[in-house]
Image (tube, rainbow, N blue to C red):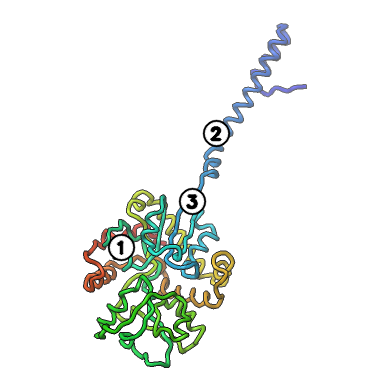
Amino acid sequence: MLSFGNPVAQRLFVIGQNSGLTDFVKWLKFLIVTTSGLLTVCFSSSHAMPESASDQTSPIPVVVQFDWIFNAQFAGFYQGIEQGFFLDQGLRLELRGGVTTANTVSATVEVPGLSVGSTESNVLIAEVAEGADVVALGTMFQDSPMGWMYIKGGDISKFSDLADRRIGIHSDGARVIELLLREAGADTSELDTFKASHDPQPLLDGKLDALQCYYIDEFVKLQQEVGDRAGIFLARDHGYKAYSQVMFTDRNTALAKSSNLRGFLKAAKLGWAYAFANPEETIDLILEKYNPSLDRDYQLRSLAKIRELMEPEPGSLFRPMRPDVLENGQSRLLEYGLISDSISIEDLLSQQFLPHD
């Protein structure tokens, strides 16, 4: 027997029984019960909609353009993706390695939508001086790891000895070594620089006397090859002041996507903290998903040196850049004709999106 919990349906049932309008009342009872059920479903659905809509929201795509290959240098981004930190901020990252482009800044700003790149601060200043409309969001490395490595035991003992040698250089340091050698009082008229790869093999073969490098990366590889015979002159020890792995985006993006950039930087910081706390797991991730050709010990050593640059003391991870360091770098670029016009460092910096926790 049917049971009608609706009071109106119950009353109609009684009326129908007593008045002889059985068929008509049966139809009304069916209509009321059906309508009541539909209203219940609709009411429940309206309360569930916000959760359902949230579940179906697609994460915002972000292109991240690195200025180097996939290795430990960008470990925080790999772990940020792996641990879901970026997804927690509603972001889905596409990582692009530096080997795909000769100019990281132009490659970044040409991407439609949200994109972030990384490069040396002096490179960024030079690009802005040439007309690039970008802003610096913050830095990963608190100092530059740039240097020139060589093999000890020959006739190189001090930095000025490089003034008349064959030096392999890269695009981001094409004139830095000449600038620093001149500041050291050396005659650079016989300096022989040429574009070289990041592979130390030509150095081992004696085809060049020194090779530009990052001490967190290529120098580690040279140490693996020759041990204590590996020597390096760090640019920072000879007056070169710059930040490295400076994160930047175009100005319009910074204005329009402020909340997304805050989320991006928060997730990146969490990713780096996780990578440093779990180095073995992080290197496993790099070798498994990003660059299987790398040597494990090489990457572990590199990650340890990277931490020294990113977190020189507790709590300094993603510490804001100092304007005076950037002003100093710009002064050198102007003095040696590397840029023709100065830029506003205040306008370049857009570090308000950095996480403070």
Q: Nearer the viewer, residue 89 or 216?
A: 216
Q: Secondary structure at mark 3?
A: loop
Q: Quadrant of the C terminus?
A: bottom left
Choose top left, top right, bottom left or bottom right for residue 344: bottom left
Q: Amino acid at mark 2?
A: Ser
- The reply to whether residue 281 is in sight is no
Please tell me how crowded label 3 is: few (under 14), some (14-19), or many (20+) other residues with Cα within 10 Å.
some
Disc 2 or 3, which lies upstream in sequence?
Answer: 2
Q: Do the residues bearing badges 2 and 3 touch, measured as CB atoms within 8 Å?
A: no
Kindly identify which numbered label has been placed on residue 127: 1
Query: Which residue shows up at 68% across the image and 18% down it?
Result: 30
Q: Position of residue 239 (x, y in %)?
A: 29, 79
Q: Nearer the viewer, mark 2 or mark 3?
A: 3
- Reading the image, the residue beneath label 2 is 46
Label drawn at residue 175 = none
Check the picture and name the quadrant holding the N terminus. top right
Residue type marked 3: Gly
Name the kind of residue labelled 1 in the image. Answer: Glu
The secondary structure type at the circle numbered 2 is helix
**Could you say whether the residue bearing mark 1 is in a helix, strand or loop?**
helix
Q: Which mark is residue 90?
A: 3
Residue 175 in picture, x, y percent from top left: 30, 74
Kindly identify the residue that appears in the image at 55 percent across and 78 percent down: 297
* In the depicted structure, whether residue 231 falls above or below residue 63: below
Q: How many marks?
A: 3
Q: CA distance from mark 3 to mark 1?
A: 31 Å
Q: Nearer the viewer, residue 83 or 154?
A: 154
CA gap, disc 2 to disc 1? 52 Å
Q: Is residue 173 above or below residue 38?
A: below
Label 2 packing within 10 angstroms: few (<14), some (14-19), many (20+)? few
